[in-house]
């Protein structure tokens, strides 16, 4: 009986962990998509090319993981045409993030 109880706890813990990881993934991907949306909005308003945007951002932020993450998101945005809608940028980034966390994002 003790083994059944321990097995039940293990199954419940695994399901709870998976649900928490999925919630974390969705939150993280929504954050990345929102960041991409803002980058595209700035890009369309200011007309910067990639080099100009990168230079401006590096002047504002210290060299940290946050800067690296921001530039990785921005680079994906700048791979799209400048006239891509903000909504399309958001959807593309969100879908790519989810695919990446599931290990199904195609290699570029």
Image (cartoon, rainbow, N blue to C red):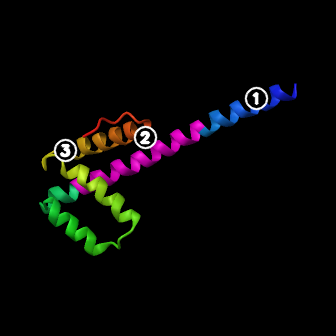
In magenta, the rendered stretch is 18-40
Image quarter of the C terminus: top left
**Circle 3 residue:** 85
Spatial CA distance of label 1 from label 3 is: 50 Å
The nearer-to-camera label among 1 and 3 is 1
- Horizontal relation, residue 28 to residue 47: left or right: right
Q: Number of callouts in the render?
A: 3
Image quarter of the N terminus: top right
Q: Position of residue 26 (x, y in %)?
A: 45, 42
- In the image, residue 25 above or below residue 1: below
Q: Position of residue 21 (x, y in %)?
A: 54, 42
Relative depth, front residue between 78 and 68: 68
**Circle 2 residue:** 101
**Between discs 1 and 3, the one toward the N terminus:** 1
As drawn, the residue found furthest toward the front would be 107
**Between discs 1 and 2, the one toward the N terminus:** 1
Q: Position of residue 24 (x, y in %)?
A: 51, 45
Please give the label number shown on residue 7: 1
SS state under label 2 = helix
Spatial CA distance of label 1 from label 2 is: 28 Å
Other residues around mark 3 within 10 Å, as few (<14) / some (14–19) / many (≥20) = some
Residue depicted at x 19% and y 44%: 85
């Amino acid at each position: 009986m003790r083994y059944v109880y321990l097995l039940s706890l293990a199954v419940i813990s695994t399901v709870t962990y998976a649900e928490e990881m999925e919630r974390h993934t969705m939150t993280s991907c929504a954050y990345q998509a929102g960041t991409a949306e803002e980058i595209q909005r700035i890009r369309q308003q200011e007309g910067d090319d990639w080099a100009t945007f990168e230079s401006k951002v590096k002047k504002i932020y210290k060299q940290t993981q946050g800067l690296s993450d921001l530039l990785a998101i921005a680079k994906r945005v700048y791979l799209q045409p400048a006239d891509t809608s903000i909504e399309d940028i958001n959807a593309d980034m969100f879908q790519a993030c989810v695919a990446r966390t599931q290990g199904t994002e195609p290699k570029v």
